[in-house]
Image (cartoon, rainbow, N blue to C red):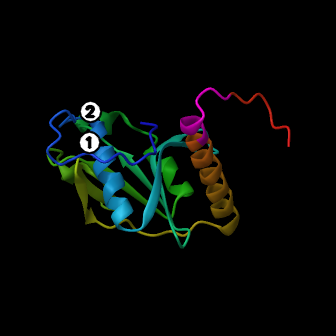
Amino acid sequence: MSDDIAVPVSDTDASFPAVGATPIFRGVRRALAMRGYASLTEFRLASGRRADVLAIDEAGNILIVEVKSGVPDFRSDQKWQEYREWCDAFYFAVDDGFPTELIPEDCGLIVADAYGAEVLREAPVAKLAAARRKTLLLRAAMTGAGRLHRIEDPMFTQSSPTV
């Protein structure tokens, strides 16, 4: 998922998929927005890893949400622990058919569908160092602005900065 634009969709939109990661992403982002967070999907961290959802609130708190579309997806993922050093709080997001007992107790837990999400367990908070927070906030701002620019001006290409 790389779309960071909120698109109004009615709750009766039958064309939206009911299973898989896409509705989980949408529900998580809606719920985070209701909690005061702005979010980016598929956000590349300085480590080279890509967080499914990176969310930031007005106070600069940073969450990472790892979306799992099913048990095989969860079991095959060995990289999720690396995300903890890049956020204040780490969550897994799953759909309501996922066996939540598989999610480690020391991680936040969100259950989502295409229309919203509920936090079943808050994530423990481990505050980032100020330098890392600043780097992440700047990177998120640049990523968001770049994505918005590509949406507004899709014919533009940039080879290198000239300013």
Residues in magenta, as a range: 149-156
* Residue 108 image-quadrant placement: bottom left
Residue 58 can be seen in this image: yes
Residue 106 screen position, x and y as percent? 35, 62
Tell me, yes or no, whether the highlighted magenta stretch contains residue 154.
Answer: yes
Residue receiving disc 1: 23
Please identify the quadrant where the C terminus is shown: top right
What amino acid type should be assigned to the residue bearing mark 2? Pro
Residue 1 screen position, x and y as percent? 41, 36
Q: Is residue 41 left or right of residue 13?
A: right
Residue at x-position 24% and y-position 51% = 112
The answer to whether residue 123 is above or below residue 44 is below
Tell me, yes or no, whether the highlighted magenta stretch contains residue 99.
Answer: no
Q: Secondary structure at mark 1?
A: helix
Residue receiving disc 2: 72
Q: CA distance from mark 1 to mark 2?
A: 18 Å
Camera-side residue: 28 or 160?
160
Q: Secondary structure at mark 2?
A: helix
Per the rendering, the mark at residue 156 is: none
Residue at x-position 67% and y-position 62% = 134
Residue 107 can be seen in this image: no
Residue at x-position 17% and y-position 47% = 99
Camera-side residue: 2 or 81?
2
The answer to whether residue 42 is above or below residue 128 is above
| View extreme (right): residue | 163
What amino acid type should be assigned to the residue bearing mark 1? Pro
